[in-house]
Image (cartoon, rainbow, N blue to C red):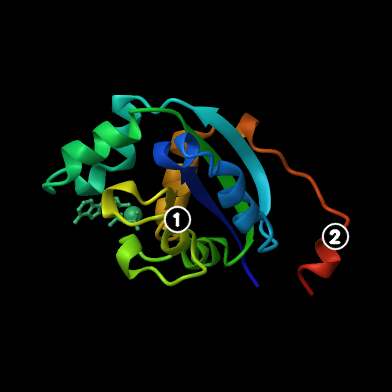
Amino acid sequence: MTTERTLVLVKPDGVQRGLAGEIITRLERTGLQIIGLKLMQVSEELASQHYGEHRDKPFYPGLVSFITSSPVIALVLEGPSAVSTTRKTMGATNPADSSPGTIRGDFGVDMGRNLIHGSANLEDAAREVSLFFDDSELTDYSRSTQQWIVE
Ligand code: DAT
Ligand code: MG
């Protein structure tokens, strides 16, 4: 089993709506381990680096203005299949298509207010983790419960 790291953002809508705790709880109880966490304001520059792949899309200006509009909570999660487990817990990009039981399906109704970001693949995860966190902000620690989470 390969251990992965992924970047999660509780987006401005999640923080403003008081859903950050609920969202983090759902991710935490999967068994993935939080190894970095901070509340931060995303700058225009960071937003353009983070969302560079969408630069030419019609929704890009709205996306950047939304992600920079109010603080986000950034997390790094680590564990087996961290990338896909996080994406599965989040639900589909458009909350209208997200299953009940997912974060976006339970708390969202609009694509432009979909509450959470999670890296799409391992390559994006490595890039995004280093965009949002210095190595010194990531903590390597072991949990006594780990043997009850991973065989
Ligand atoms: P995801 O966040 O699920 O990885 P993405 O990378 O395709 O989705 O897009 C990044 C964000 O941009 C997404 O969370 C919401 C917004 N977005 C994507 N497609 C959109 C669209 N067609 N209209 C409005 N916003 C969109
Ligand atoms: Mg994406």
Query: Residue 12 location in percent, x, y?
Result: 41, 36
Mark positioned earlier in the residue sequence (1 or 2)? 1
Judging by the rendered image, the residue that carries numbered circle 1 is 107
Label 1: element kind: helix
Gap between marks 1 and 2 measured at Cα: 30 Å
Q: Which residue is drawn at 40% across and 40% down?
A: 13
Would you place residue 22 above or below residue 48 in this image? Answer: below
Q: Can residue 48 be seen in this view?
A: no
Snapshot quadrant of residue 139: top right
Would you place residue 52 above or below residue 27 in this image? Answer: above
Q: Residue at x 11, y 47 (%)?
A: 58
Q: Which of 97 and 127 is in front in this view?
A: 97
In the picture, measured across the screen, residue 72 lies left or right of residue 60, that is right
In the picture, measured across the screen, residue 27 lies left or right of residue 40, that is right
Q: Residues within 10 Å of mark 2 (few under 14, many from 20)?
A: few
Query: Residue 54 location in percent, x, y?
Result: 21, 48
Judging by the rendered image, the residue that carries numbered circle 2 is 145
Q: What residue type is labelled 2?
A: Thr
Label 2: element kind: loop
Question: In this view, which residue lies farthest toward the right?
Answer: 144
- Of badges 1 and 2, the one in the foreground is 1
In the picture, measured across the screen, residue 1 lies left or right of residue 42, that is right
Query: Residue 6 location in percent, x, y?
Result: 52, 53
Q: What residue type is labelled 1?
A: Phe
Q: Residues within 10 Å of mark 1 (few under 14, many from 20)?
A: some
The quadrant in which the C terminus is found is: bottom right
